[in-house]
Amino acid sequence: MDRVAELEEQAAEIAAAVGRLLAERGLTLAVAESLTGGKLANQFAAAKGSGEWFAGGVVTYQTMSKHRVLNVPEGPVISEEAVRSMAQGVTAMFDADVGVAASGAGGPEGQEGQAPGTTWLAASVSGTTRTQLRHFSGEPLEILAQTQLYSLRLLHSLLAAA
């Protein structure tokens, strides 16, 4: 199995675990994605019982989309402030209890002066938002798979602690 497939398999397992926690607690989830282009939403949609807890998601790939759709403040979108706004914005948009967001430079080129693989992640659970800066390596598909996996890990850890 190649590295991307391994990462995606791990992500599916964590998405399922997140889904179980959400179902047990009667919570709903919304997703705001940029560089992952729908990979997070795809993982949640494929999880058992997702119709009960997955409210939906948005892919705001272009900078302007983040500003217009999710009310991300003007300025860099590969930033802590941007992903925090994305997670909180999508949670409000879908009237969800939980939100997760990712924004970064997926490669092969950098973006906003950030090297490929520079990624900000955010998870928001009932008003508490946690962010994380990661620097992934590899080809674009590897960076996307790592972003997906670590976003799910961040969300799972925040949910488990809540």
Image (spheres, rainbow, N blue to C red):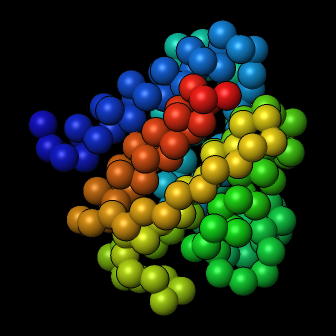
Q: Nearer the viewer, residue 100 or 52?
A: 100
Q: Residue furthest bottom?
A: 113
Image coordinates for residue 135, horizontal then vertical, percent: 37, 67
Q: Is residue 90 left or right of residue 15?
A: right
- Position of 162 relative to 125 (above/below): above
The picture quadrant where one finds residue 72 is bottom right
- The total of numbered circles placed on residues is 0
Q: Nearer the viewer, residue 126 or 34?
A: 126
Residue 112 in sight here: yes
Q: Residue furthest front?
A: 161
Q: Is residue 29 left or right of residue 138?
A: right
Q: Which quarter of the image is occupied by the C terminus?
A: top right
Which residue is rendered at x = 56% and y = 15% of the image?
20
Image coordinates for residue 48, horizontal then vertical, percent: 53, 13
Which residue is rendered at x = 54% and y = 47% of the image?
38
- Position of 134 relative to 125 (above/below): below
The picture quadrant where one finds residue 30 is top right
Which residue is rendered at x = 33% and y = 38% of the image?
8
Q: Is residue 14 left or right of residue 32?
A: left
Q: Is residue 68 left or right of residue 137?
A: right
Residue 58 in sight here: no
Which residue is rendered at x = 43% and y = 47% of the image?
150
- Position of 49 relative to 140 (above/below): above
Q: Which quarter of the image is occupied by the N terminus?
A: top left
